[in-house]
Image (cartoon, grey):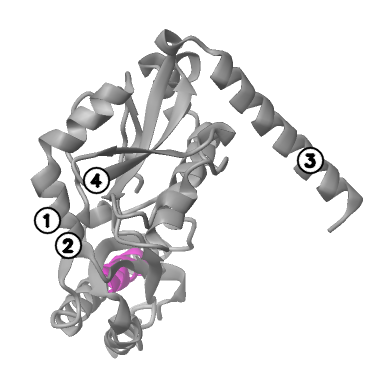
Amino acid sequence: MSTTDRTDNRTEATAHVRARDRTRDQPQSQMRVYVYGIGRDDGTLAPLAGAGGGVDGHDVRLVAEGGLVALVSDVPAAAFGEEPLRRRLDHLPGLEELARAHHAVVDAAFARTAVLPLRLATVYSDVEGVTGMLLAHRGGFTDMLTWLDGHIELGVKVFVDPAASPPAPEHRAAHGSGPTSPGRAYLQQRRRQRRGTEDLYRAAEEVRGQVTRAVLETARASVAHRTQQGELSGERGMNVANHAYLVPANAEARFRAEVEAAGSGVAGVRVEVTGPWAPYSFASPVTEGGEGGTAPR
């Protein structure tokens, strides 16, 4: 690690300590409670309390009620009220920073036990709102934690890359026919390109169906997400399928092999498996009372 890197790290750590110190000095009326996720109150998540890796460097703590715990951080209302949050979520760098911190806390919890991740930017006015949420949905949360125990989330994305596909065959002019005009040749070329693209998308849909059938017995559940385009996909080509699967942790290698076997060998179509992740797509705790909230995907 270079001297510059060490200096940057010390500067960042100092900024986080100052942020926590300012938070402690704030009157309770100027504070909000940011919630990351929910787990069982069995001591497994206790080591995470006091860690400073929460949003904007704020400490993580546990709020317990009804046999459950919520992973939370006390945050200033000036930065996490409804309007400041909306502005931050509309600003890509601010959104990315918030998402990284949120997911880091959830991942640390998920590495220890089953956890229900809450939606990104779920904020309550006070601790009473959090404990009320835990009590109101205690039965559903407990059942969901039992259902998710021992499972991971894996993503499957199908991409179409027209540049990688073979061109549609060019039909020769019939014997005896005259030369083709430049205008007609151009139209014929466009029709061939269109046919090639249509064939490619049909092939991608067939691959998607093959993958779905191949993992039917391995995956416990699946969710179809909106496809990701532009900066969100971070990949070359067009994302035409974006599915999440709930898979037993001990069946991850089998799942990946099934997807690879079903999705390989089609020019211009690429299949990618992502994860493992905490089960964001399969944990949908009710969070009434939260001031913010957006899906992490």
Q: Is residue 250 left or right of residue 81?
A: left
Image position, residue 287 (x, y; %):
21, 33
Which residue does the numbered mark 4 point to in the structure image?
Answer: 68
Which residue is at a point 35% across and 45% down the rendered structure image? 296
Element carrying mark 2: helix
Q: Earlier in the sequence, mark 2 or mark 3?
A: 3
Q: Label 3 belongs to which residue?
A: 10
Q: CA distance from mark 3 to mark 4?
A: 36 Å
Q: Position of residue 149 (x, y in %)?
A: 23, 66
Please state which of the two labelled residues, at mark 1 or mark 3, is closer to the viewer.
Answer: 1
Which residue occupies the foreground of this view, 91 or 34? 34
| Residue type, mark 2 in image | Thr
Mark 1 and mark 2 in contact? Answer it, CB < 8 Å.
yes
Span highlighted in magenta in the image: 189-201
CA separation, marks 2 and 4?
12 Å
Q: Which residue is mark 1?
A: 143
Ranked by sequence position, the earlier of labels 2 and 4 is 4
Residue 14 vertical placement versus 26 (above, below): below
CB within 8 Å, label 3 to label 4: no
> In the rendered structure, are the residues bearing label 2 and label 3 in contact, judged by CB atoms less than 8 Å apart?
no
In the figure, 8 relative to 43: above or below? above
Query: Badge 3 local density, few (<14 within 10 Å), some, or many (20+)?
Result: few
* Left or right, 165 with reference to 23: left
Residue type beneath disc 3:
Arg
Which circle, 1 or 4, is nearer the viewer? 4
Percent across and percent down for residue 10 are 79, 40
Of callouts 1 and 4, the N-terminal one: 4
For marks 1 and 2, give the CA distance: 5 Å
Estimate the spatial distance between the alpha carbons at disc 1 and disc 3, rounded to whole Å. Answer: 43 Å
The one of 56 and 178 positioned closer to us in this rendering: 56
Residue under numbered circle 2:
146
Query: Does the rendering let one see residue 151?
Result: yes
